[in-house]
Image: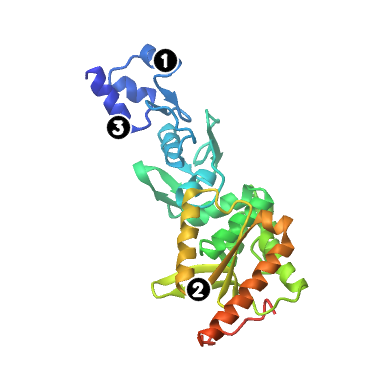
Amino acid sequence: MCRNASDRALRDLGVFTSRTARSLGYSERQVRYRLAHHRWYRVVGHALSVDPPPPSGWSPVTLARAASITWPEAVVGFRVAAAVLGFPVRRETTVHVLTPAKRHPLHGVVPHFCPVGEEETWIGYGGVRFTRPGRTALDCLAVLPPAEADDLHAWLVTRRYLSPQSLEAGIRDRRRRLGTGRLRDLQHRSASGVLSEAERRVHRLLRETGVTGWEANVRLEDADGIIGVVDILFREERVVVEIDGRRAHDTEDSFVRDRRRQNRLVNAGYRVLRFTWADIVSRPQGILTEIRTALARSVGWIRHNNVGFSRRNEFDGRGA
């Protein structure tokens, strides 16, 4: 095969190994030369690429494919699997994989000796095996720092990737495994129904200042179906309060999804307020003022337009 054709074949693959390059006619010396002179680039493990890494680093899909061609029997899990699934986790440059046999870490790939059943995996782009959403959620929550785990847990619960029952089952099934103690701590922190430290602080602020008539973690719908679970709802006033945790929009996908959901809420007749972790920490009184202003304006608008809303779903009392 001519060199141009070989180059095109490797570029079409995206990631490849030196063995693949040799099968296309490159010698070991040519492989080393291209790596040394930045004609080719190392990704992770044994994987190489003709193209340089983008400014933001290798994408989660590229990292997963690189780990998969390094160890075909491995299952990609933890942060990289979570990022591929769209979970709002911090981008990772190291790929953690689950392997059926003990292996030593390689460049950018960390193995965990832990066989995974077929029912816990799914096949992604390029034939890469990933842990399923439920398993990925538990694995991430078991190793993340408490604050980050709280934020991810809130996201997972409100989007129905995880329930209290599945968390309990996960703890039961993971006895003596890495991170089981952290999962128990997370279960204890979330037992009251508050899903994150950010929510906990806002709930406390509302209660301590006598603001009543609100509900937490309410599922809302419009004509097109389920919009999602909102953090705080003042049902009578049609006011929604969304609380963005410390890592709420670490991924572009999660940022876009939340904006689309907000547009649907507005079109459904809700006034939407959003507060960040910085707002909660540095200006709690400002949050309180904005909520009270929105409530007063919503009541005025409803009365002025003589609008009545169904009261089929009464307050559940959690915010009263």
Callout 3, which amino acid? Answer: Asp
Mark 2 Cα-neighbour bin, 10 Å: few <14, some 14–19, many ≥20:
some
Viewer-nearest residue: 35 or 263? 263
Q: Is residue 29 above or below residue 54?
A: above
Q: Amino acid at mark 1?
A: Arg
Whether pointer 3 and pointer 2 mark residues with C-beta atoms closer than 8 Å, the reply is: no
The residue at 54%/87% (across/down) is: 311
Residue 183: quarter of image = bottom right
Q: Earlier in the sequence, mark 1 or mark 2?
A: 1
Outermost right residue:
208
Residue 175 in percent (x, y) is at 64, 54
The answer for how far apart the CA atoms under marks 3 and 2 are is 45 Å
Asked which secondary structure carries label 2, the reply is strand
If you read the primary sequence from the N terminus, does the residue marked by circle 3 or circle 2 appear first? 3
Q: Of the residues under marks 3 and 1, which one precedes in the sequence?
A: 3
Please state the horizontal and vertical placement of residue 36, each as a whole percent of the image: 45, 15
What's the residue type where badge 2 is placed? Leu
Would you say the residues marked 3 and 1 are in contact, meaning their CB atoms lie under 8 Å apart?
A: no
Which x, y percent locates residue 253? 46, 52
**Residue under numbered circle 2:** 220
Circle 1 — which element?
helix
Q: In this view of the protein, which residue sits in the foreground, 296 or 133? A: 296
Dot 3 corresponds to which residue? 12
Q: How packed is label 1: few (under 14 Cα within 10 Å), some, or many (20 or more)?
A: some
Q: Nearer the viewer, mark 1 or mark 2?
A: 2
Residue indicated by mark 1:
32
